[in-house]
Amino acid sequence: MKDKQPIPLARWMNERGTPNSWIADRANTSRETIRKIRIGDSIPRPDLAARISTATNGEIKVLDLLYPTGKPDGVKF
């Protein structure tokens, strides 16, 4: 089992002081959805992960959103 690491989106937003509403507006989703992803209670669907990545100018990768604690053992990308 891997140690719990900060969710990449949360780290990115915290470093910049970015509110949930900023990402939500640019990714065309709700603030509540972003809040859940940010705290690790939800994993976005691939299409939303792509929109969030676009909103961060690619600084947050789609795979980081889909696998916030790292890729599963034995999986190759």
Image (tube, rainbow, N blue to C red):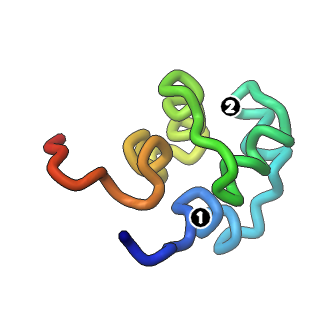
In the picture as drawn, the residue positioned furthest to the front comes out as 1
To which quarter of the image does residue 21 belong?
A: top right
Q: Nearer the viewer, residue 74 or 28?
A: 74
Give amino acid for label 1.
Trp
Indicate left or right for 65 with 39 as reference. Answer: left
**Mark 2 element type:** helix
| Residue bearing mark 1 | 12
Question: Disc 2 residue type?
Answer: Ala
Reply above or below: 52 against 7.
above
Q: Residue at x 48, y 26 (%)?
A: 46
The label on residue 42 is: none
Q: Residues within 10 Å of mark 2 (few under 14, many from 20)?
A: many
The x and y percentages for residue 40 are 64, 56
Q: Is residue 69 left or right of residue 73?
A: right
Rendered position, 44 above or below 2: above
The numbered dot on residue 27 is 2
Whether tag 1 and tag 2 are in contact, CB under 8 A, the answer is no
Which residue lies at the image location 59% right of the left edge and 64% below the top edge?
12
